[in-house]
Image (cartoon, rainbow, N blue to C red):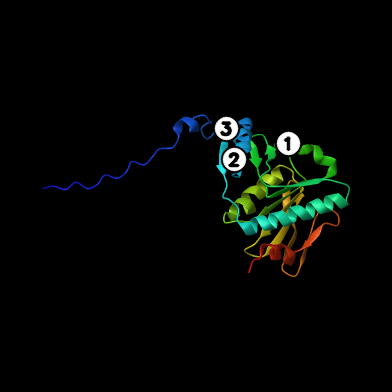
Amino acid sequence: MTIKAPSSPKRPEPAWDIARLFPDQGYWSEGDYLEVNRRTNRLVELDHGNVEVLEMPTKSHQRIATFLHGLLETYAAAHGGGEAVIAPYPVRLWEDKIREPDVVFCKAAHIDRMGEDFADGADLVVEVLSDDRRRDLETKRREYARAGIPEYWIIDPAEKRVVVLKLEAGDYAVFANVGLGERARSASLEGFGIAVDEVFAVAKWK
């Protein structure tokens, strides 16, 4: 007698009818992106018609970003205004290029750049490095410079360093590259700075 092996249960398919409500990769508009961005709890970016879903940040990552956001808000309150917003909050770099820095800051003079759904540029952006280090160290460094953002802070938990980049002649130059026991200071916000030890103490890195 032949015994038939039990058949494997059929794997359910995605809800294609819902998926087809959205454009194919390469055909997303800014409007399509913003509509989805309002409805998701994921970090999503737009790159010339393609949507990119980012990895979810860790608790330590969020502690650092929240700490920097709070310091920038405190600075703004003491120096005539401005606003800092923590991700998710899109920044439009140019047409069909939208990124979501971990923290975005605009001075009071440029506060009108910060719309309800996205910012049209920024005065300072912060990225906390995660597993995809190249994205922040190379890709976004190049893009933020092209967009004319005057200052870019990179927080590196693995190396326990803070890098401050200053825009010069269309490209970023290293204004500060500091580690534990040192203090990072802003290239464009007079009086703004932070002890590196405090950044990583907040994250409880060991």
In this figure, which residue is indicated by the disc labeled 3?
Answer: 28
Tell which circle, 3 or 2, labels the residue nearer the N-terminal end.
Answer: 3
Report the residue that reaches farthest toward the left: 1
Report the mark closest to the observer, 1 or 3: 1
Q: Amino acid at mark 3?
A: Trp
Q: Do the numbered discs 1 and 3 sit on residues whose CB atoms are within 8 Å?
A: no
- Residue drawn at x 45%, y 34% is 15
Would residue 62 be seen by someone viewing this image from the given angle? Answer: yes
Which of the labelled discs sits on residue 53, or is there none? none
Tell which circle, 2 or 1, labels the residue nearer the N-terminal end.
Answer: 2
Report the mark closest to the observer, 3 or 2: 2
In this figure, which residue is indicated by the disc labeled 1?
Answer: 116
The C terminus: image quadrant: bottom right
In this figure, which residue is indicated by the disc labeled 2?
Answer: 40
Q: Do the numbered discs 2 and 1 sit on residues whose CB atoms are within 8 Å?
A: no
From the top left corner, tell me how far across and down residue 205 is, in percent: 64, 66
> What is the spatial separation of the Cα atoms under label 1 and label 3, in whole angstroms?
21 Å
Would residue 165 be seen by someone viewing this image from the given angle? Answer: no
- Residue drawn at x 73%, y 57% is 67
> What is the spatial separation of the Cα atoms under label 3 and label 2, in whole angstroms?
16 Å
Q: Amino acid at mark 1?
A: Glu
From the top left corner, tell me how far across and down residue 163 is, in percent: 71, 59
